[in-house]
Every structure is written in C-alpha cells, then in structure tokens.
C-alpha cells in the first residue's frame, strides 16, 4: 500500500465518522457544543439496563485521557492527512517542474522529492509490533 493509498483510507474512515469537532467530558465523547443540536454521543460509559442484565457489556471509555485522545482525533486526523498529502503533492510538483532536466537544481529537487516520499511512506508503513 502506498502512502497515498493509506492516507486515502484514513481520510475515508474520518469522513465516515460522526461529524466533528468532538469533545471529551470526563469519559464521554460527544459532538462539540458549538455544533447544532442534537449532539451525538460518540463514546460513553452509560449502560442500558436490559443490555447489562442480559449479559451485555458495561464497559466503554474508562480513562479520561483516552476520551481526550478520541475527541481530538476527529479533527487531528483530517489535519494530519492534509499535511502529509500536501508534502507528497509538493514532491510531485518538484518532479513535474523539472521533468527530465539534467541540471544540478533539477537533480537536487528530484532527490528531495524522492526523499520526502520515502520518509512519508516509511512513517506510514506498519511496523512489526503495530496492530
């Protein structure tokens, strides 16, 4: 999978998620108060009695730090995708601008473009311990 494929998949997941921004209030994550009502809850510890009584789970987001992370991800992820996509676009522009030119500047910029793409791709490539 290329860096662009990965970024497109991340953006697709972000686009499919509940509209943001989100906020964390204790261990509950919901749409930010600045959005029009009704606000949707994204994650909560609230338990429906029937679900719990019949073997359902009473577990949700249990740590406030996790809730903060989840809430921030709704706006952080699209920003990160945009930033990395912009870096890859810049690399493409450098390659297109210089084409097949053999000048020193062209060679330097093509090398920079390849380095940018390689660094972004390496950072997005799952490591052995990643899930």
Image (spheres, rainbow, N blue to C red):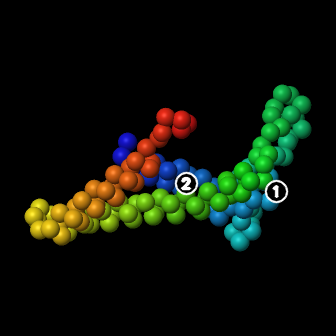
Left or right of 101 in this view: 86: right
Question: Could you give the CA–CA distance between mark 2 and mark 1, rounded to whole angstroms?
Answer: 23 Å
N-terminal of the pair, mark 2 or mark 1, is 2
Left or right of 12 in this view: 27: right
Nearer the observer: mark 2 or 1; the answer is: 1
Q: How many neighbours does mark 1 have within 10 angstroms: few (below 14), some (14-19), or many (20 or more)?
A: some
Q: Nearer the viewer, residue 31 or 99?
A: 99
Spot occupied by residue 15 in the image (x, y as percentages of width and height):
53, 55
Q: Secondary structure at mark 2?
A: helix
Spot occupied by residue 40 in the image (x, y as percentages of width and height):
73, 57
- Point 45% across, 64% down: residue: 83
Farthest residue toward the top?
Answer: 55
Q: Secondary structure at mark 1?
A: loop
Spot occupied by residue 70 in the image (x, y as percentages of width and height):
67, 53
- Quadrant location of the N terminus? top left
- Point 72% across, 62% down: residue: 23
- Quadrant location of the C terminus? top right
Q: How many marks?
A: 2
Image mark for residue 26? 1
Contact flag, marks 2 and 1 (Cβ < 8 Å): no
Q: How many neighbours does mark 2 have within 10 angstroms: few (below 14), some (14-19), or many (20 or more)?
A: some
Does residue 6 lie above or below 110 as drawn? above
> Can residue 5 be seen here?
no
- Point 21% across, 65% down: residue: 108
Q: Nearer the viewer, residue 76 or 100?
A: 100
Image mark for residue 14? 2
Spot occupied by residue 14 in the image (x, y as percentages of width and height):
55, 54
- Point 60% across, 53% down: residue: 17
> Can residue 86 be seen here?
yes
Image mark for residue 100? none
């Amino acid at each position: 999978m290329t860096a662009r494929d990965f970024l497109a998949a991340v953006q697709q997941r972000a686009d499919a998620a509940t509209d943001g921004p989100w906020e964390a209030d204790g261990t509950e994550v919901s749409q930010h108060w600045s959005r029009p009502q009704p606000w949707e809850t994204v994650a909560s510890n609230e338990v429906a009695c029937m679900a719990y009584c019949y073997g359902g789970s009473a577990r949700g987001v249990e740590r406030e730090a996790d809730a903060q992370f989840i809430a921030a991800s709704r706006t952080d992820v699209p920003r990160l995708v945009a930033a990395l996509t912009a870096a890859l676009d810049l690399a493409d522009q450098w390659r297109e601008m210089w084409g097949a030119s053999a000048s020193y500047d062209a060679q330097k910029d093509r090398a920079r473009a390849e380095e940018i793409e390689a660094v972004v791709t390496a950072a997005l490539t799952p490591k052995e311990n990643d899930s």
